[in-house]
Amino acid sequence: MTGAVTVERLVKRFGALAAVDGVDFTVAEGEFFTLLGPSGCGKTTTLRCVAGLESADEGRIGIGGEPVFDATSSLDLPANERAIGMVFQSYAVWPHMSVAENIGYPLKIRGAARGVIDARVEAVLGILEMAGLGARMPSQLSGGQQQRVALGRALAVEPRVLLLDEPLSNLDAKLREQMRAELKSIQRQTGLPILYVTHDQIEALAMSDRIAVMSQGRIHQLAPPEAVYNRPHTRFVLEFIGSVNYLPCRIAEDRGATLRLAVPEGELVIDRPPDVPNAAELELAVRPEDLAMREVGSGVPEARVVLRSFLGDGFEYHLELGERRLRARTDTAVEVGEGSVVGLAVRRGLLLPAGSASATPITRATD
C-alpha cells in the first residue's frame, strides 16, 4: 500500500443498504483530498471507516503505507492505533479545560511527560497563531478560535494524516471563509495530508487538491477542482457542483471547431465540447456564467429578463425563454433592466443525450 491513505474496494453495509459501495482512492503525502457529496452519499461513513470508528465489510485501508484494515485477513486496528488526528463537526472542546489543557489532553492520556506535553502544546499554538492564549478558557474564545483548538488537539499527537468531518459547518459565512484560508495555510505549514468531508461545494473547490464526488455510496468523479467543475464526468456531478441551465437542441451543422445548434427559439453556435454524444436529440448544459446576453437579432434565441439580483461583485439574472427559466451571471459592467428582451449566446457548454440519467457519462474520465 502506498500513499498517506489508501482505500481499496471499500464496502460498508447497514442491513441491505450499501452506504459505501466499492470505493477506491489514494490520498498522497501532503495532499488536501476531499470527499464531497449530499447527505447520505457515504462520505462520512467512508471517513469513519478510515478512522476506525466504523468497521467496513469488505476492502482494505492503509495509512502511511501500513495496512490498518483488511477484510480478507480480519485486520481491523482500533482508532487509537491508526496514527490519525480527527476533527469533528462539533468542536468537542472541553469547557472546563484551558486551551493548553485541551490541546495537550491526548498526550496526557497517552502518558507523555509534562515537559513533552508543554513543548508540543507551545509548538501547536504557534502553528495555530494562538501563541499566548494557552491559559484562556473556551468561553473566552470565538467560534473560529474554538475550532482551531479542536484542530490543535488533533495536531498534538503528530498524526500521519488529518481527518476532518465537516469542521466548518457550525461557523457563520465570514468565519467559514476565514477558516478555509487558515486550514490551507496550516496544511502547507505542517505538510500533513488531509482527508476532508463536506457537502459544501465552495469549500471543496476552494481548498482541495483533488475532489472525489460521491453519490449513493459511489465515487462519480475523482479529479482536481477545475476538472470537476468544467469537465464533469456524469450528470450528477454537473448538477451538484454549481448551477446549470438546460436547453433542448440538435446539431444543425458540425463545423469542426464549433457546432451550430438548433434550439426551439433559434440557433446557437458553441465551441465543440470535449465529447459529443451520438444522439439526435440532445440537451445543452450551460453554467450561468457561460450564458451571455447580447442585442437581439440574427436569429439568436431571445429571452425576457424577469428578475435581476445584485450579488456585490456582479448580477444574477432570471430569464424567461419560452416556457423555460434560465439563469445568467455577469460582472457589474453588464447591467440589464428587468423586462428587457435580450439575445442569448453561449460561451461554452456540454452536450448530453436528452433525458439522460444521473450516472450517464458526459465526458471521458481522462483526469
Image: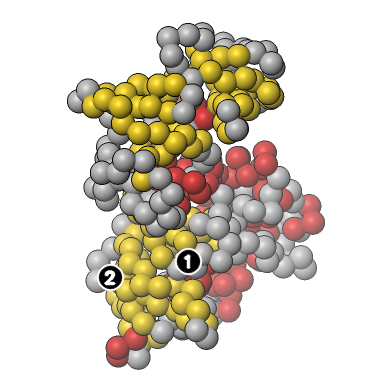
In this image, 34 relative to 86: left or right? Answer: left
Kindly indicate the quadrant of the structure image that contains residue 192: bottom left
The percent coordinates of residue 124 (x first, y second) are 53, 55
| Crowding near the residue tagged with mark 1, few <14, some 14–19, many ≥20 C-alpha atoms within 10 Å | some
Residue at the farthest left position:
256
The residue that label 1 is drawn on is: 216
**Residue in the picture at 38% in, 27% down:** 262
Query: On screen, 351 above or below 317?
Result: below
Q: Answer yes or no: is residue 250 visible.
A: yes
The percent coordinates of residue 181 (x first, y second) are 53, 40
Question: Which part of the image, by quadrant, shows the N terminus?
Answer: bottom left
Mark 2 or 1 closer to N-term? 2
Give the distance between the C-alpha atoms of the residues marked 2 and 1, in whole angstroms: 28 Å
Residue 151, numbered circle: none
In the rendered structure, which amino acid carries the disc numbered 1?
Gln
Judging depth in this view, the residue of 89 and 99 nearest the camera is 89
Report the label total: 2
Query: On screen, 21 above or below 352?
Result: below
| Crowding near the residue tagged with mark 2, few <14, some 14–19, many ≥20 C-alpha atoms within 10 Å | few
Give yes or no for contact between labels 2 and 1 (Cβ–Cβ under 8 Å).
Answer: no
The residue that label 2 is drawn on is: 65
Which structural element holds mark 2?
loop
**Residue in the picture at 32% in, 74% down:** 9
